[in-house]
Image (cartoon, rainbow, N blue to C red):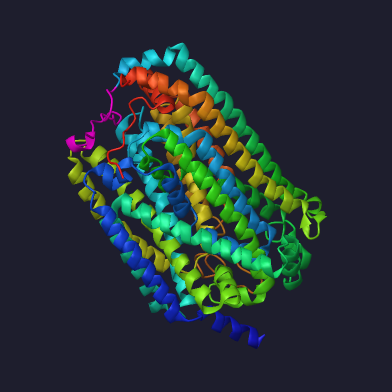
Amino acid sequence: MSSDLQGPPDMGAPVGTGGGGTPDPEAYSRAQVSPQFQELRKRYRGFAFPMTLAFLVWYFAFVLAAVFAPGWMATPVWGNVNIGIVFGLLQFVSTGLITFLYVRHANDRLDPLAAEIRDEMEGTR
Amino acid sequence: MNTLVRAAETTASGSPVVNMAIFLAFVAVTMVIVIRASKTNKSAADYYTGGRAFTGGQNGTAIAGDYLSAASFLGITGAIALTGFDGFLYSIGFLVAWLVALLLVAELLRNTGKFTMADVLAFRMRQRPVRTAAAISTLTVSFFYLLAQMAGAGGLVSLLMGITGDVGQSLTIAVVGVLMIVYVLVGGMKGTTWVQIIKAVLLISGAALMSLWVLSRYGFSLSNVMGAAADNSPLGDKLLEPGAKYGVSTLTKVDFISLAMALVLGTAGLPHVLMRFYTVPTSKEARKSVVWAITLIGLFYLFSLVLGYGAAAIVGPETIAGAPGKANSAAPLLAYELGGTLLLGFISAVAFATILAVVAGLTITASASFAHDVYANVIKKGTIAADAEVRVARIAAVVIGVLAIFGGILAKDQNIAFLVALAFAVAASANLPTILYSLFWKGFTTRGALWSIYGGLISSVGLIIFSPVVSGKVDANGNSLSMITNPNVDFSWFPLENPGLISIPLAFFLGWLGSVTDKEQPNVAKFAEMEVRSLTGAGAEKSVAVH
């Protein structure tokens, strides 16, 4: 059953009532300070934050090179393909690579721990 | 020159009958699917999220269908054909932006919210003021984006159906608007999603086919395509280098950086993209959605590079610039040169489908925000039944659709890619800072959220109003290039065309300033709930149906 059938929830945050039990508010505060959750948080932020910084720096390096070093970007590499095009295509490659690395990290390091905490809180399994 | 213009006119029209027939076939097929999908629509969750029962692959394809708008397909191809490398920046910004969504937003949002962006922004704040702000921002961004698509529909028609009169174009915009209202009313999110999936498949396979076709003419060498494009262009080799459009002066260079910033930070703040993450059952499926979306969108933008240079090489920049619809006609003209009437008909239908699918997604997002945030939670304080809320959402969809038709008729001569870039700037300023602060910063307060949302919204929209986009930009011949086409009206004082460089940092700053000066303490218990819920999914909304 979904909570929608009983009308929208009160002014508080929407709360799901489907599937397993809904954790009570204190349970969240307890979970937040638990070593398990602290570890999950560290693993998530330890990957996501530096990686975000890295791809933003890499992206703006491309943008700034296009604006302030157009001559260098125009240097031919292979036929009519110049450094600018290669740099641009490398943005596609890096996006794919970061996506792959994050998915692997999330599957191996985040999901099992998150599931453990969730199951404990919802009391499903 | 005369023959060129005549060639442009004939190729531009192709065969209106074929174009129309293929488009009607698309409408007929999708309508049947929408009606079938809607049979199981019962609850509010069905209407807003398709019962949260789509798989990551389905949703990722739908995201690509939602995201690759007319601006991407027609706008970017045209921009690369006419300005070369500088058009390529759009592709890269639009793609890299997905990493923000993947790493920081998609999964956490799925775990935290229910139907709308405001669910997340207002989660640990005082509900009414923050929901109101988030809803205003959602409606503004969606409306900007909607205008761009409707304007695109008008331009496309003049190109493909040979309809050049004001009345004819306006009528077509109205037809697109009415169709979209029907899709949304009948199908809800489920129907809209299927329209987007079908469109994504058609669009990406069409682009792949055309790219291979172009490459096959040049020995499968990108270098040869680029060489032929440069030979054909008045820019010569400059077409292959950065700077053709934005390298003119220091001001245009700064504008380029501003645009780049809005592109990369805007995606994860677009309400219609965010809402799609609620259509899957778990955060893991939300992650899979983004992976699919990145793959499909990345592929498409690679094709757009080939198509853009291919259009310059095969069609020629003069023909494109002289055709009705100008830069936006590059892709259809290329289709005609490659595959004649039939391919043009197919590509035209795909372009229409593109616009239709995107406007449907925008309409459902805007109507959900009005019904769920403004009506149910702010006006009725959460005391109305879900059925009544959905009824309001449907009425809102009709009203928004009608407004979009009128807005689209007024904006029909505007550049599509450009209007979309403005929507990105507003999203990056008004929405993204508050989303990130809400998810990650314990000290964020209600006042911080309000300052950031309103500050970002007012500064970005305000700077656009006082920029050369709206008034006072003239070309060498004294013709106006602004929205207000009277060259004597000039109230612009902000020099940049994209406000992102100023308004995005300002919104981040205001979010911080509002929070640290707020007497009201942050709600610690709610932050604990939000943080644990966002990372683990404990207590997150569950799927209500099985496909």
Residue B408 location (% of width, % of height): 40, 65
B311 or B382, which lies in front?
Answer: B311
Magenta segment: A1-22
B425 or B82, which lies in front?
Answer: B82
- Magenta: predominant secondary structure element? loop
Residue B152 location (% of width, % of height): 47, 66
Q: Is residue B174 magenta?
A: no
Residue B105 location (% of width, % of height): 47, 36
- Where B518 falls versus B171 (above or below)? above
A79 or B430, which lies in front?
Answer: A79
| In the displayed structure image, the side of residue B11 where residue B526 appears, left or right | left
Q: Is residue A9 magenta?
A: yes
Q: Quadrant of residue B168?
A: bottom left
- Where B399 falls versus B141 (above or below)? below
- Where B172 falls versus B102 (above or below)? below
| In the displayed structure image, the side of residue B190 where residue A53 appears, left or right | right
Q: Which quadrant of the rendered structure holds the N terminus of chain B?
A: bottom right
